[in-house]
Every structure is written in structure tokens, then in C-alpha cells.
Image: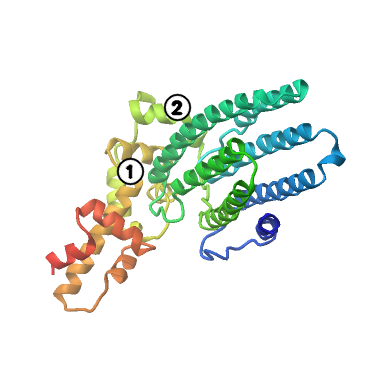
Amino acid sequence: MVYGGSMIFALIACIYLLFRRSNAIAPEVAPPLRLRRWVAAFFAVMVMSHLSWFVLVRYSRLFGDPLINLVVAAALDCVVLIPLIMGMLLNMLQDRRRPLWPFILASLPVVALFAAIIYRHDTTLVSWVQGYFMVMTIIIIIYMAYAVRQYSLWLRNNYADLEHKEVWQSFMVMVICLLILSFYIYSSSGMTYEYTLQVFDYLFVVILLWRVETLQTLENNDDNDDITQTTDVEMVAALHTGAPQTTIPGNIGLLLEQYCEGGQLYLRQDITLSELSKAIGTNRYYLSLYFTRQNTTYNAYINGLRIQHFVRLYQEAVATNRPFTAQQLAQESGFRSYSTFATAFKQRMGKTVTIWMRWNS
């Protein structure tokens, strides 16, 4: 019953992601359709895997050698699920296109080892499969930890509002995926094993649905910006070495002061680096380089201006005895959510909003 329930649950989640285009969990968030399709494919494979294992276990005598059947089923799970897991996570990193083929190649030795088990009709090579999978898991976790960190830096260099955009939770999703697969590979059969695995499946479907529906789709408005033809390697090198070919115009600071600060562009919610660069008459690359050489990020710059605006509004409200709330002033200062404001305020001012207001009342 638990086994069949988890299969039906995954099937319902698959159909939901394929045919519903809006979010039920976070209706205000624009859903990333590409990610929804990847996760739907993963749920579909979960359903097929459950179904195939049920048939093999219940009717094993009808399909020839039980050992070969089990090995083939396990091999298919490992080979298909690993690329799907990585595909899901890579699609959560929307800043760039990362290749999936290395993870597909990494699955090929698993195929070879399972083929050797079938050919020799010997399970002693199972320990080789387990060892290889452990090494591959460690490498993947290290790589994705680095990728998620780079993605977070990219977000701070391009977006003022990071709510529903940060994906450190996605890294935890990947770790949970790999832990479930490790449990699947290293554990033996038994009722405790089966029930535990099904509980994992239920929780995993819920976690994936939550992650898909709370991740904001990032709009890429830089397609017509010729500077974006610069490769990632050249961009990083330019930002950190300050090569002569990346000399930035000397008037960017004045343009920011005139249009962003004077014109209060920072009050626009979800304003991006690309939008600001066009508003002040430069391009995204030079503006990003300017912030880097100022030892700050675009996110820190915009939120710093918003916090200064909040302080001015607070001081005016106190001086005129106007009733207000911190949430109201934060929204008037350009912050979409109070939690984002509270975090940014504490980072910049060194104390919470409540304590700061108490000291400055």
C-alpha cells in the first residue's frame, strides 16, 4: 500500500507539473517552465521505476534469471536518475548553460560494472559499484557546491531583489537526492528498508514541488547587448585583473548619482543590473565592472540606497509624528518583502530594525 501510494503520488505530481502553468504554492512567483518539465520527467521515471520493481519482485520467475533482472533494473535506475537529478539542479542555476554530458559520461562506468556482474553472474563486483558511486557522489557535491556559490555571486552582481532567486536550497535538494540513491544502493532488502525508502520518496516529491514553485524565473534581457558575447572566463578574468581592454568609462559614478540616486531608480522593485545600465546610458558589463572595482555588488549598492531612503522616511515620520510601521516604510523604500529588508538592514547597519528604531526614536 505504501509502495503503491508513493507511485501514485509521484504520478499525480508529474501530471500537475506538466499541465498546470501557474503555481499553487506561491502564486506570485513566475514558474520556470523548463525546470517544471525536468522535474515532471523525474517523477515519470520514479513511477516507471516503482512499476518495474513491483513487476520484477512479484513475477520474477516469469522473466528468467532473477539476478540478471535485478541488476538490469538497478543499472537503469542509476543511469537514468543521475542525469535527471543533475539536469534538474542545473536548470535551477539559471545564470548560464552548464553541460549535462559530463554527468552522463560519469554514469557509463556504472553500466560497465553492472554488465560485468551479469556476464560473470557474480555479485562480488557490487562493492565496486558502491565504491564508484561514493566517489562520484563526493565529486558531484563538491562541483555543485562551487556552482551554487558562483551562482549566488552572479545573482548579487545582477539583481537587487534576491527573494525567490537564491538556490542554496537547491543544493540541499541535490544532496537529498544523492543520499536517497546512496541508501538505495548500499542498503539491502527488507521491510524496514522498503518503508524507509517510500517515506523518502514521499518527502522528496514534496520538496521538489516546493522548490519548483518557489523559484523565480529569471528574465534575460541581455540578448541584444553585444558585450554579453564575452565568455565567462574572459568576464571573470577582466573583473579580477582589470585588464586594459576592460577600461570602464569614467562617468559611470556620476551617471549613477544623477539617474539612480537622484532619480530614485532604486525604488523600482526587481530592477536588474541590465535595466539600470540601460537607464543610465551604459552597458551591463561596464556597470558590473564598476561595482566590482568599488568592492561592492549591485545588490549591496541598490539595497544600501533603499536603506538610506528608509532612514530618511523614518526620521521624517518621527519628526512629524506621522503614524507608520516598519513594513510600510520598507515597502515605500523599494523592498518587495519585509524579510529581505530586515536581512539587508542588519547586514548594513549592524543591528536589527527593531533595535535601531528603539535607539533612534
* Amino acid at circle 2: Glu
User: Which quadrant is the N terminus positioned in?
Assistant: bottom right
Side (left or right) of 354 relative to 97: left
The numbered mark at residue 297 is: 1
Q: Earlier in the sequence, mark 2 or mark 1?
A: 2
Comparing 254 with 270, the one in front is 270
Is the residue marked by circle 1 packed among few (<14), some (14-19), or many (20+) residues within 10 Å?
A: many
User: Residue at the spot x=42%, y=41% of the render?
Assistant: 154
Side (left or right) of 237 relative to 177: left
Q: Secondary structure at mark 2?
A: helix
Residue corresponding to mark 2: 234
User: Which quadrant is the C terminus positioned in?
Assistant: bottom left
Q: Quadrant of residue 24?
A: bottom right
User: Residue at the spot x=52%, y=64% of the render?
Assistant: 26
Q: Quadrant of residue 89?
A: top right
Image height of 177 relative to 293, above or below: below
Image height of 101 relative to 305, above or below: above
Is the residue marked by circle 2 packed among few (<14), some (14-19), or many (20+) residues within 10 Å?
A: few
Q: In the rendering, at what x and y percent does residue 222 appear?
A: 51, 44
Comparing 54 with 247, the one in front is 54
Q: In the rendering, at what x and y percent does residue 60 appear?
A: 81, 41
Determine whether label 2 and label 1 are within 8 Å by CB: no
Q: In the rendering, at what x and y percent does residue 357 appear?
A: 18, 66
Q: Secondary structure at mark 1?
A: loop
Q: CA distance from mark 2 to mark 1?
A: 19 Å
* Amino acid at circle 1: Thr
Q: Quadrant of residue 106?
A: top right
Q: In the rendering, at what x and y percent does residue 333 appear?
A: 31, 63
The numbered mark at residue 200 is: none
